[in-house]
Amino acid sequence: MEYIIISIGFALVLLGLYGIMYMRNLMRIIIAFTLFNTGINIVMVSIGYIRNASAPILDAIPAAGTTPNIVDPVPQALVLTAIVIGLGVTALMLTYVVKLHQDKKSLDINNFKDLKW
Amino acid sequence: MVKKFLILLLVAGMGLIIFDLYQAYDSKENLSTLGEYYAQNGAEEVGAANLVTAVVVTYRGLDTLGEVSILFLTAAILSFALSFRKEDEIEEKELRPTSEILSIASQVLTPIIMLVGIYIFINGHLTPGGGFQGGAVIASAILLMLMAKPKLEISHKIIGFVESISGLSFIIIGALGIVLAGGFLDNRIMSLGTFGTLLSAGAIPLIYIFVGLKVGAELSNIVGSMSHNQNEK
């Protein structure tokens, strides 16, 4: 099961990279970036998975010295941070696309050559 | 053609790196050392049933403070960049009236969605969820309102007020931890209560209420300034 999840994560990373390179439309490039982001998040969560363990929410305080059968909470907390940062980055990218579209009335990346050498 | 080939080459190279990582991955039977410490002592030290919340708000609370600041910075840059236009270019766009289904449904659903958002961030220490998720749900209610009434202006005064008050309270609660308990953002400034009830885990519900309000205000601000920009030509 965990191998399926981590494969999906890696596949999304590759798909995102391909989309970032291949797509011409700026909005599609942003969607590819979010796919990349989601793929990495899925990989991080699946790294914290412990076989046959449950979610890190406890019913009672564990007795001293015993470890409850839960998955690792640390990668999950990390992913929570990563999702929020990803949201901020996506919002900023969308803003710049809006500004670029106001300037050139186009979303095709080939029409923006000001910084090309 | 050459470009497509280069792209495929790059993706294949990345695939090779990733395949190496995939081969090294091995499903685990035991927790890592840090995770084991949190699993054994987290519930007793922090009192939160949801260990992810314990890590996010208490053990790594400083990171959450940074995260909230990044979100604030995003909202600030975004409204700055979107408002940066020549005055004479701005023209109001003619909009189609919204359909009756959307406008009535938004009136029914907006309070319910807000309530769900508040429920999610108040119960962050017991169930999956927390300040960020609850704030995002609240912002989605604002988004629904904006879709039903595109001309609606979100008051920057109210948003600024909610945001600064909740941000300030978050830092004050954190600083109180230095005085009354073990360190910055220590949640033991209040009694830990009975494990698994709403009023438990010390200051975590309080901190998550402020984080939820702050994130909700920030995301509403982002949605509002984007929608305001859409109404202009």
Image (tube, rainbow, N blue to C red):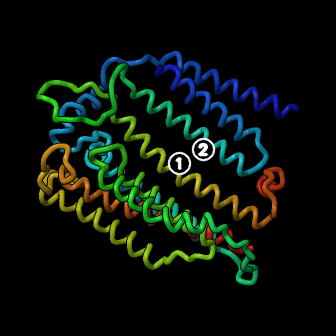
* Residue B81 visible somewhere in the drawing: no
> At x 26% / y 55%, what residue is drawn?
B205
Q: Which residue is mark 2?
A: A34
Circles 2 and 1 on the same chain: yes
Q: CA distance from mark 2 to mark 1?
A: 8 Å
Relative placement, left or right, of B76 versus B151 is left
Q: Are marks 2 and 1 in contact (CB under 8 Å)?
A: yes
State the quadrant of the C terminus of chain B. Answer: bottom right
> At x 56% / y 52%, what residue is drawn?
A89
Q: Which x, y percent locates residue B26?
A: 44, 16
Relative placement, left or right, of B227 versus B182 is right
* Residue A23 visible somewhere in the drawing: yes
- Say which element carries label 2: helix
Mark 1 nearby-residue class (10 Å; few <14, some 14–19, many ≥20): some
> At x 16% / y 42%, what residue is drawn?
B45
Identify the chain of the residue marked 2, using the numbered disc in the image.
A
Q: Which residue is mark 1?
A: A86
Q: Which x, y percent locates residue B144?
A: 55, 63
Along the line of sight, the residue nearer the viewer: B74 or B227: B227
Along the line of sight, the residue nearer the viewer: B219 or B179: B219
- Say which element carries label 1: helix
Which tag, 2 or 1, sits closer to the chain's start? 2
Q: Which x, y percent locates residue B158?
A: 43, 77
Quarter assignment of residue B3 = top right
